[in-house]
Image: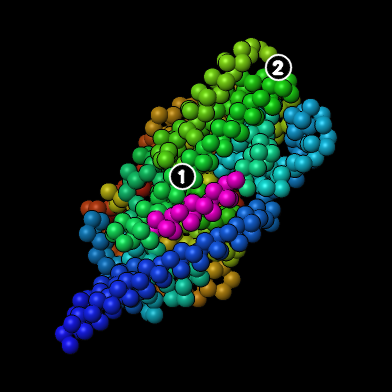
């Protein structure tokens, strides 16, 4: 009988092992390499899930709205077979990443509506607003923030269905963005950007 | 009593195992039935999506030209040529494929890669062969057979603790089957091209150009799972076939001028498509291929310069600068060239020149979308 119970436990654990659960987004995240801190408490009612070093956040479901937080190494090969150029301007990073997303059939008719450099925690970061049509035909709107660090780029991206969901959760994204704390030594100065005097 | 309990235990275990593997078999069978019934629907849905997405290019002169080539491939037999319709669509992929009703879909960039009518004829003949040799149906049948085998091996594999064995062997088998079709289509297409008066050596050139464009992807391709043979293999097979037929290199028509007169207006659109989709290597190959020709429009020079400026600035500063300069100082200048020249100089530490070009850009285009960004950089200098 014990053996049968063991069978059942093993079987159940096999099935449950396939699914990583969504958990309430709480606490704060301290990135070890880049030494930046981000508060995950702020957007209330959001759920988080980590898949292959990428952190996803959502309230209504990934296809309606989500925030993604991940790192891209400077040396990482993109799916087009290309690497991030060594000489790159801050504003070019999101263009390359959005191009990469579209190359992966992530969306059709992508359009960058605004590309700017804004200060987050006193450091200049590329902030890009864009829109595209998802494979399920929903028009999506997004905002992406790229922070250059010495070993990699940290990307925080908010994407939501344009007409209804984008405005709903936009403030939550901004709140999350405002909690980022960057360590001075780890920031990488790209051409055309003056060193920040603290 | 003790014996009875042991017997019940062993029966319980056996029935549990039977139920478990039985349920796996039912799942596999269910998937198989779905696969068989829905295959045709899924196939047509994929193509319908392209048709519905408004990316099909409606150009009478282009369509007429493609029809002419199809007609020539059938030695002016209208009835045979009527079996095929060709649709060109805007996508950054370098691909062409045929549907089981005789529709051939061609992605626009492949027409930018092709250099003459003989190469186009080879591509069309290849796709027409897939249709005429019934490769679609054969592939569907093979897919069905392999799915059944995969389900069986999956069950056997799960008993011995080897997961994914079935699907892997099915993929390898399907890959081999598909490659056989590709070789057959190449061989028949080559014969069609020769018989209809085109130069068959163009087919060899077609594979070489394709290899130049896709070198970076070709290296990464896992041959045993791929649906197409390696490009160099196809190139060699094609070359050997031509040599075996003792075909003279100068025999037959190439049709370079007629091809370029129809396709040249699309080159900028192709370059833009490739740049938008980050197909940098393809665009780079195209820029090199077209720079050898007399392709000097300012828009093209701007795109080429932008490509070099963004992605290859380290090695190509002087070339990018030259291209962007030409685009900026043309009789009909491309205003964005000033901005890109600014960025190029900025990246290379020449802030004075960068500031000069940024100011010129802002003067020419004060309400530009990226004016704020340019002003930010000017403020940092």
Q: Position of residue A179 (x, y in %)?
A: 32, 69
Left or right, B193 with respect to A14, comes to right
Q: Position of residue A129 (x, y in %)?
A: 50, 59
Q: Residue at x 54, y 54 (%)?
A: B144
Q: How is the image coloured?
A: rainbow
Q: Secondary structure at mark 1?
A: helix
Residue B140 on the magenta span: yes
Q: Main secondary structure of the magenta part?
A: helix
Q: Is residue B227 above or below residue A197?
A: above
The stretch of residues the image draws in magenta is B138-154
If you read the primary sequence from the N terminus, does the residue marked by circle 2 or circle 1 appear first?
1
Q: Quadrant of the N terminus of chain B?
A: bottom left
Mark 2 or 1: in front is 1
Q: In the displayed orientation, state which residue is furthest to the bottom.
A: B1
Q: Residue at x 31, y 56 (%)?
A: B162
Q: Quadrant of the C terminus of chain B?
A: top left
Please report, as a chain letter, where disc 1 is located: B
The circle drawn on residue B173 is 1
Q: Nearer the viewer, residue B266 or B173?
A: B173
Question: Quadrant location of residue B21?
Answer: bottom left
Please report, as a chain letter, where disc 2 is located: B
Residue B180 on the magenta span: no
Question: Quadrant location of residue B347?
Answer: top left
Q: Is residue B165 above or below residue B231?
A: below
Kindly identify which residue carries mark 2: B252
């Amino acid at each position: 009988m014990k053996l049968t119970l063991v069978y059942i436990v093993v079987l159940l654990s096999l099935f449950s092992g396939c699914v990583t659960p969504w958990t309430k987004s709480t606490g704060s995240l301290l990135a070890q390499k880049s030494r930046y801190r981000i508060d995950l408490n702020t957007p209330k009612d959001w759920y988080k899930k980590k898949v292959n070093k990428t952190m996803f956040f959502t309230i209504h479901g990934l296809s309606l709205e989500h925030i993604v937080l991940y790192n891209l190494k400077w040396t990482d090969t993109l799916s087009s077979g290309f690497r991030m150029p060594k000489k790159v301007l801050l504003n070019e990073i999101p263009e390359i990443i959005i191009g990469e997303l579209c190359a992966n059939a992530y969306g059709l008719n992508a359009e960058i509506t605004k590309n700017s450099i804004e200060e987050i925690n006193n450091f200049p970061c590329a902030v890009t607003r864009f829109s595209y049509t998802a494979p399920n035909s929903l028009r999506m709107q997004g905002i992406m923030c790229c922070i250059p660090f010495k070993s990699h780029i940290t990307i925080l991206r908010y994407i939501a269905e344009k007409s209804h969901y984008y405005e709903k959760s936009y403030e939550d994204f901004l709140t999350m963005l405002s909690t980022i704390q960057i360590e001075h030594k780890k920031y990488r100065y790209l051409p055309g950007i003056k060193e920040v005097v603290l | 009593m003790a014996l009875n309990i042991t017997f019940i235990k062993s029966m319980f275990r056996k029935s549990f195992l039977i139920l478990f593997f039985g349920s796996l078999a039912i799942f596999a069978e269910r998937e198989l039935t779905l696969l068989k019934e829905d295959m045709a629907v899924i196939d047509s849905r994929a193509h319908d999506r392209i048709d519905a997405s408004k990316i099909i290019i409606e150009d009478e002169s282009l369509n007429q030209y493609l029809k002419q080539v199809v007609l020539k491939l059938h030695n002016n037999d209208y009835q045979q040529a009527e079996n095929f319709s060709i649709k060109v669509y805007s996508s950054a992929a370098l691909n062409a494929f045929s549907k089981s009703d005789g529709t051939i879909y061609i992605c626009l960039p492949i027409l930018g890669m092709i250099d003459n009518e003989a190469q186009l004829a080879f591509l069309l003949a290849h796709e027409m062969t897939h249709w005429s040799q019934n490769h679609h149906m054969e592939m569907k049948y093979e897919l069905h057979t392999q799915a059944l085998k995969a389900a069986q091996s999956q069950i056997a594999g799960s008993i011995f603790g080897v997961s994914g064995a079935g699907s892997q062997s099915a993929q390898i088998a399907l890959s081999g089957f598909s490659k056989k079709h590709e070789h057959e289509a190449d061989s028949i297409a080559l014969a069609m091209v020769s018989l209809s008066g085109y130069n068959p050596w163009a087919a060899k050139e077609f594979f070489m150009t394709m290899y130049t464009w896709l070198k970076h992807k070709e290296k990464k391709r896992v041959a045993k799972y791929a649906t197409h043979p390696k490009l160099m293999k196809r190139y060699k097979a094609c070359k050997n076939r031509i040599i075996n037929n003792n075909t003279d290199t100068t025999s037959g028509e190439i049709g370079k001028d007629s091809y370029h007169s129809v396709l040249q207006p699309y080159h900028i659109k192709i370059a833009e498509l490739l740049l938008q989709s980050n197909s940098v290597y393809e665009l780079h190959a195209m820029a090199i291929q077209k720079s050898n020709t007399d392709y000097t429009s300012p828009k093209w020079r701007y795109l080429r310069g932008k490509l070099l400026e963004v992605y290859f600035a380290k090695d190509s500063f002087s070339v990018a600068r030259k291209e962007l300069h030409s685009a900026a100082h043309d009789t009909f200048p491309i205003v964005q060239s000033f901005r890109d020249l600014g960025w190029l100089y900025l990246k290379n530490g020449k802030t004075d020149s960068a500031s000069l070009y940024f100011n010129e850009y802002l003067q020419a285009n004060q309400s530009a979308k990226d004016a704020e960004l340019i002003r930010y950089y000017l403020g940092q200098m």
